[in-house]
Image (cartoon, rainbow, N blue to C red):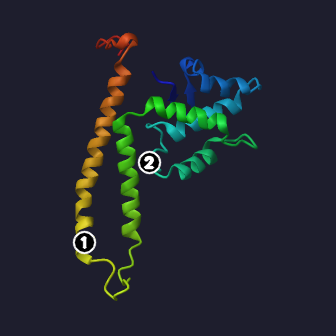
């Protein structure tokens, strides 16, 4: 079930099923405005921060991702990520993330930290004994092994894409769609 979809105009579309779920319905109903601008922007924020397919998913630092998404999506003055938004985000993540997705996100975060570490190494730093703190062979070996790490992450990404495809082809009752059942 797709709760949120990004259309061709890069607008988040909210499915009726999403509004049937309590955390999302609360966000929708607390917005008393006819155009539901605050609710739509809040649900879009949740999508862009939490969904694996979000264009912002490559920002591995979640707090930084939240800031970037808020700047890009939220136009309502005084909007803040409150308890209701956090509850809906936790709900969405709990129900949309597979073990493989979590592993992939953690691998990406580790890769980002390793990249930052390698970028900031002080090759002249010495320890208390006056020896070089960082062994150039160890650094070289680490850099050389990055290709294997990237390949592993790519394989995880492919596995996640397969999981998403399988989940998108499932129908009610766990039945699989027939080849032309969706009109394709």
Q: Residue 60: give x, y in percent of width and height.
A: 45, 51
Q: Nearer the viewer, residue 120 or 184?
A: 120
Q: Residue 167: give x, y in percent of width and height.
A: 36, 24
Distance, label 2 to label 1, CA atoms, is 28 Å
In terms of image quadrants, where is residue 70?
top right
Q: In this view, does 125 lie to the left or right of 67?
A: left
Q: Residue 173: give x, y in percent of width and height.
A: 38, 10
Q: Is residue 33 above or below residue 154?
A: above
Residue at 66% across / 25% down in the picture? 26
Residue at 36% across / 56% down in the picture? 111
Residue at 37% across / 55% down in the picture? 110
The C terminus, quarter of image = top left
Look at discs 2 and 1 and give the one toward the viewer: 1
Residue at 35% across / 80% down in the picture? 123
Q: Name the residue under label 2.
A: 58
The N terminus, quarter of image = top left
Q: Is residue 18 left or right of residue 133?
A: right
Q: What element carries label 1?
A: helix
Mark 1, other Cα within 10 Å: few <14 / some 14–19 / many ≥20: few
Q: What element carries label 2?
A: loop
Q: Is residue 27 above or below residue 129?
A: above
Identify the residue at the far bottom of this view.
Answer: 130
Q: Is residue 18 above or below residue 70?
A: above
Q: Name the residue under label 1.
A: 138
């Amino acid at each position: 079930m797709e709760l949120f979809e990004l259309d061709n105009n890069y607008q988040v579309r909210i499915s009726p099923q999403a509004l049937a779920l309590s955390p999302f319905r609360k966000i929708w109903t607390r917005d008393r405005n006819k155009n539901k601008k605050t609710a739509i922007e809040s649900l879009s924020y949740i999508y862009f921060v939490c969904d694996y397919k979000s264009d912002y998913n490559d920002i591995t630092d979640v707090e930084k991702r939240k800031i970037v998404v808020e700047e890009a999506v939220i136009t309502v003055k005084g909007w803040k990520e409150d308890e209701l938004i956090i509850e809906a985000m936790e709900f969405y993540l709990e129900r949309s993330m597979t073990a493989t997705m979590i592993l992939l996100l953690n691998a990406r975060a580790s890769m980002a930290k390793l990249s930052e570490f390698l970028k900031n190494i002080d090759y002249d730093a010495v320890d208390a004994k006056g020896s070089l703190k960082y062994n150039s062979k160890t650094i070289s070996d680490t850099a050389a092994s990055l290709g294997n790490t990237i390949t592993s992450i790519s394989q995880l990404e492919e596995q996640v894409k397969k999981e998403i495809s399988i989940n998108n082809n499932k129908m009610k009752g766990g039945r699989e769609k027939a080849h032309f059942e969706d009109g394709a």
